[in-house]
Amino acid sequence: MKFSARSQAISPFLAMEFGKRAAALEAAGRSVVRLNIGEPDFGAPPQVLEAAAEVARSTPLTYTAALGLPALREAIAGFYLRAHGVRVDAQRIVVTAGASAALLLVTAALVDPGDEVLVGDPSYPCNRQFLAGFGADVRLVPTDASTRFQLDAALVRAHWSARTRGLMIATPSNPTGTSAPPAQLRAMCEFARERGAWRVVDEIYLDLADGDASGRPAPSVLAFDDEAVVINSFSKYFGMTGWRLGWCVVPPDMVPVVERLAQNYYICASTLAQHAALACFSPEAIAVCEQRRAEFAARRRLVLEGLREAGLQVPVEPDGAFYVYIDVGPTGLDAMRFCERALDEAGVALTPGNDFGESGASRHVRLSYAASREQLHEGLRRLAGFVRTLGLGPGSAA
Ligand SMILES: Cc1ncc(COP(=O)(O)O)c(C=O)c1O
């Protein structure tokens, strides 16, 4: 069979490929610590599980409206107000099958073939695959530790061209766990807005991010750019990866456009998941999620400490998403080889930077600390042993 050029152009998602290899090793009787996937180990809050059981018993679970259950759209709007102090009209909130479907709708709505779009490198690979799938000319802008591996206003200005139509930013970032400073995010959005370009901001990790020095939560881009298109999800903060539920916030004139696309592409998000997700916003469920956020912060400290002791360097400490981007250059191995050998020799699954772009990709490895403390301790112990065999050891991190 002949497959489309579009489908051939998509490279495999290496995080999942390493997951497959890990599963094969486990099937052969090996023990593997899986730190390759960004999936909270907690699962959904108990209130959501109870709601799902009740809904499954009492509701026929027919399709919902393509834009989502009105009550859920209202509940998400309420969450923006309570958690971020931002008033968002529920009519602008579109419930989707995960952030992934939100990205699908939004790119389908905004991108014409040949449109140039600026995307930071490294960044979450699927976002740029959606753009490229709709014919965008994706311009990967190299970033490094000096800008926390994020785009900033100077980089956007330097890479902007007459053909640039949009800007796609994920903050906090996957794979680095780092956020763009709010002032920079604002400046980038203003720059794009003044030039009539769209801004898509993926805030899927926002509610896991650290607050500012005075304890205020990290702001949503909607606090200063009302026309930014925002992507979010129940996958990370609410721990509901497998429920396939997310949302986007779009400007009013874009609502009927994404509605048409959703109707045609997948009709609606899972009805069961939508009903159950209403329970996410109860004070009890939010308390559970906040406790988990604190747990992630503790795990982050544990991981940074363990990596330092192992002699591995982390150029920028994460402040949001549960990832650490490790510079494996000093080990003498490139990222791919480091991950292959860490898996084969030490039984630790990681993800090579090659998944996330080109800039510095072959010297960085992503570790996800969305795993239990027990698993993290064991993974770090194994990694330290592996790194010792490479001639690096305690105290060698700069
Ligand atoms: C930055 C980013 N955006 C989107 C997604 C997709 O998430 P979802 O499970 O909501 O489809 C992920 C998943 O890891 C991600 O890291």
Image: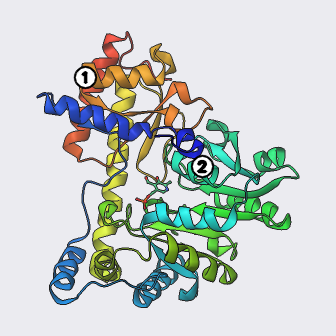
Kindly identify which numbered label has been placed on residue 163: none
Name the residue type under label 2: Arg
Category of crowding for the residue at label 1, using alpha-carbon neighbours closer than 10 angstroms: few (below 14), some (14–19), many (at least 20): many
Please tell me whether mark 1 sits on a helix, a strand or a loop: helix
Identified at 41% across, 84% down, the residue is: 72
Which mark lies nearer to you, 2 or 1? 2
Q: Residue 182 vs residue 126: left or right?
A: right
Identified at 43% across, 45% down, the residue is: 323
Identified at 66% across, 78% down, the residue is: 254
Residue identified by numbered label 1: 346
User: Can residue 83 be seen?
Assistant: yes
Name the residue type under label 1: Ala
Residue identified by numbered label 2: 128
- The earlier-in-sequence mark between 2 and 1 is 2
Marks 2 & 1, CB-CB < 8 Å contact: no
Image position, residue 185 (x, y; %): 68, 59
Snapshot quadrant of residue 357: top right
